[in-house]
């Protein structure tokens, strides 16, 4: 539970040197006298449960808006951490099966198993890579610059080793172990130096100036719109007021995800009279909408990223691929809907998943821009966002109101920082009841609309950098680091005296 304070928005990362070292010392001391290996699964599960129940409690807030879900709140508070903790239980159990006799090789083995299981947690069963320990450094941008090379999972593996490294001094205080501990600190310092040089180089690159503004909106519109008969026209007028369009300025306006419930993609044109009062040919609108497609008499619904011109003629669309379990789709829906369950964010049925994510090329007489669209928590998936880096920036639209006044929106925004560094791209984020902002490829927040506020920020120029190493090779680099750890484990195991 103490370890959770290292995560956003607190970021007391120094805590991890204490908690991870104590955890490893406990594991080693227990392993010297163990009788039943199954107990180690329980030890790992307990650590994971304390960790996740304190930093993911906010998920249960999403169930407070619909009376039919409130009975699930106690279950959600405990069951989600309980499930995620299984991965931590497996870390301990596998370690005790493989545990070498030597301290340093045990330390490397523990780090390796931990890093691999965290990768699996973020990959299987749709994946939930939330709150990896690497997020402790989300405020240390110079250090985080290494993500452009090794990615989130690669740096997460290093972080586990770094935070556990004091334990080898406590367990076996030798000159060699002092050197090993010092080496991790030196590597961390080298990451900082790399980040400082990377930052300096970034600010010497040429600027690309647009003759239009990319205006991203942060709004604070209540989730009551999903449950009460609120006129969409009122919401549209409020968003237009926040957007503050000017007849003489060319601008692309970005509005949040699902901001107009009950208005499908093809129905937005019904409100063209409202738009015509403020929008003209110099304006484009990007907005999160729902899409309904009929196929063989059956309706499929999609959470969509939609682009319109000033006349609300539909131009481009992307249907969300990574859906939120229980939020956007109900697992085993045919069974669970008979006991009264449904997906949280709509009143009809689960969303369907889109086919693929493609770069959207906005090109006409007024605008020329290539964007990568992402909806809500799709931003959390490291190494899975794109294969082709030929685009200008990433646009992420989100609705964070489901998590109330909790730490959830802060954590959500932190993911955007890591993705910007990995990809080497600007990220423009629009959110309702969350944080909207512009993040550059260094992870620096150039401008933002704070949590709980309404307003906008503009982007009119970017600095272009070459594709990052990670954006080219992705999590293959994490695979190479795994091989490096395996090589070190076998190499040190052959040495008689570590």
Image (tube, rainbow, N blue to C red):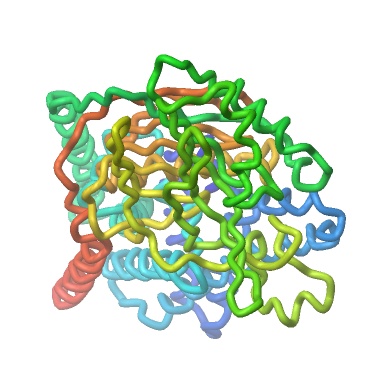
- In the rendered image, residue 483, in percent from the top left (x then y), is placed at 20, 71
Q: Along the line of sight, which residue is nearer the eye, 331 or 303?
A: 303
Seen in the picture, residue 138 relative to 327 is either above or below; the reply is above
Any part of residue 307 in sight: yes
> With 453 as the anchor, is 388 left or right in this view?
left
Residue visible at 67% across and 48% down in the picture: 263
Q: Along the line of sight, which residue is nearer the eye, 41 or 259?
A: 259
- In the rendered image, residue 313, in percent from the top left (x then y), is placed at 49, 43
Residue visible at 47% across and 25% down in the picture: 280
Residue visible at 47% across and 59% down in the picture: 129
Seen in the picture, residue 465 relative to 491 is either above or below; the reply is above
Q: Along the line of sight, which residue is nearer the eye, 30 or 40?
A: 40
Q: Quadrant of residue 63?
A: bottom right
- In the rendered image, residue 11, in percent from the top left (x then y), is placed at 47, 37
- In the rendered image, residue 111, in percent from the top left (x then y), is placed at 34, 64
> With 404 as the anchor, is 250 left or right in this view?
left
Q: Quadrant of residue 291?
A: bottom right
Report the quarter where the C terminus lies: bottom left
Any part of residue 455 in sight: no
Residue visible at 28% across and 57% down in the picture: 154
Number of labels in the image equals 0
Seen in the picture, residue 229 relative to 209 is either above or below; the reply is below
> With 494 as the anchor, is 78 left or right in this view?
right
């Amino acid at each position: 539970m103490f370890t959770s304070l290292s995560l956003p928005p607190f970021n007391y990362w120094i805590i991890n040197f204490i908690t991870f070292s104590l955890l490893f010392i406990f594991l080693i001391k227990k392993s010297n006298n163990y009788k039943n290996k199954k107990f180690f699964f329980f030890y790992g599960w307990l650590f994971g449960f304390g960790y996740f129940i304190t930093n993911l409690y906010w998920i249960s807030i999403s169930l407070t808006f619909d009376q039919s879900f409130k009975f699930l709140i106690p279950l959600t508070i405990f069951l989600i951490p309980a499930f995620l903790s299984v991965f931590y239980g497996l870390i301990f159990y596998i370690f005790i099966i493989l545990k070498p006799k030597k301290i340093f090789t045990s330390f490397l083995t523990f780090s390796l198993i931990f890093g691999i299981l965290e990768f699996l947690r973020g990959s299987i069963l749709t994946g939930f890579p939330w709150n990896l320990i690497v997020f402790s450094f989300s405020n240390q941008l110079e250090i985080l610059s290494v993500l452009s090379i090794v990615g989130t999972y690669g740096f997460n593996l290093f972080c586990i080793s770094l935070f556990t490294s004091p334990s080898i001094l406590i367990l076996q205080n030798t000159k060699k172990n002092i050197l090993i501990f010092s080496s991790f600190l030196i590597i961390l310092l080298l990451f900082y130096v790399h980040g400082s040089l990377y930052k300096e180089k970034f600010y010497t690159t040429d600027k690309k100036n647009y003759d239009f503004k990319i205006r991203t909106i942060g709004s604070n519109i209540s989730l009551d719109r999903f449950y009460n008969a609120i006129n969409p026209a009122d919401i549209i007028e409020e968003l237009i007021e926040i957007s503050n369009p000017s007849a003489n300025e060319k601008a692309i306006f970005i509005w949040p995800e699902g901001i107009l419930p009950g208005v499908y993609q093809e129905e937005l044109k019904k409100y063209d009279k409202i738009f015509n009062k403020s929008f003209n040919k110099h304006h484009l609108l990007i907005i999160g909408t729902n899409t309904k497609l009929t196929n063989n008499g059956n309706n499929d619904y999609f959470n969509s990223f939609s682009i319109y011109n000033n006349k609300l003629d539909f131009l481009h669309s992307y249907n969300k691929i990574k859906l939120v379990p229980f939020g956007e789709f109900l697992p085993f829906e045919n069974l669970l809907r008979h006991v009264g369950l449904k997906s949280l964010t709509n009143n009809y049925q689960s969303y369907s998943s889109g086919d693929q994510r493609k770069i959207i090329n906005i090109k006409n007489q007024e605008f020329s821009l290539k964007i990568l669209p992402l909806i809500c928590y799709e931003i959390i998936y490291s190494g899975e966002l794109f294969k082709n880096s030929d685009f200008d920036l990433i646009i992420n639209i989100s609705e964070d109101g489901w998590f109330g006044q909790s730490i959830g929106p802060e954590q959500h925004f932190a993911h955007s920082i890591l993705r910007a560094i990995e990809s080497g791209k600007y990220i423009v984020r629009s959110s309702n009841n969350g944080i909207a902002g512009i993040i550059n490829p260094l992870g620096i927040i150039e401008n933002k609309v704070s949590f709980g506020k309404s307003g906008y920020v503009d982007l009119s120029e970017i600095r272009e950098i070459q594709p990052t190493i990670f954006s080219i090779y992705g999590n293959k680099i994490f695979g190479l680091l795994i091989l490096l750890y395996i090589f070190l484990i076998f190499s040190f195991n052959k040495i008689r005296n570590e």
